[in-house]
Image: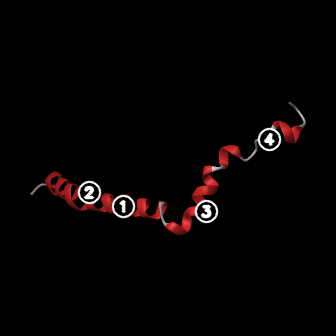
Amino acid sequence: MDTYSLLRQIADSWVLLAMFTFFIGCAVWAFWPSLKGARDDAAGIPFRNETTAQETGDE
């Protein structure tokens, strides 16, 4: 068996499995219930420095 065929078989099986496992792990970590506060905080980033017209006195 030449080197290319060996590496191709490894990539087709074990590396694919490792990448799939990593993806599932990231998805589970991102939606873990205890991280809800961090997700809510990150969702509000675009609105942190906004001021309303009432706060500035402009109308």
Tag 2 residue: 16
Residue located beneath label 4 in the image: 51
Q: Quadrant of residue 3?
A: bottom left
On the image, the x and y values in percent for residue 26 come to: 43, 60
Disc 1 to disc 2: CB gap under 8 Å: no
At horizontal 60% and vertical 60% (from top left) the residue drawn is 38
> Which disc, if any, is residue 37?
3
Residue drawn where x is 26% and y is 57% of the image: 16
Where disc 3 sits, the SS reads: helix
Dot 2 crowding, Cα within 10 Å, few <14, some 14–19, many 20+: few
The residue that mark 1 highlights is: 24
- Mark 3 and mark 1: span between their CA atoms? 21 Å
Q: Earlier in the sequence, mark 4 or mark 2?
A: 2
The three-letter amino acid code for the residue at tag 1 is Ile
> Observer-nearest residue: 36 or 26?
36
Residue type at the position of mark 4: Thr
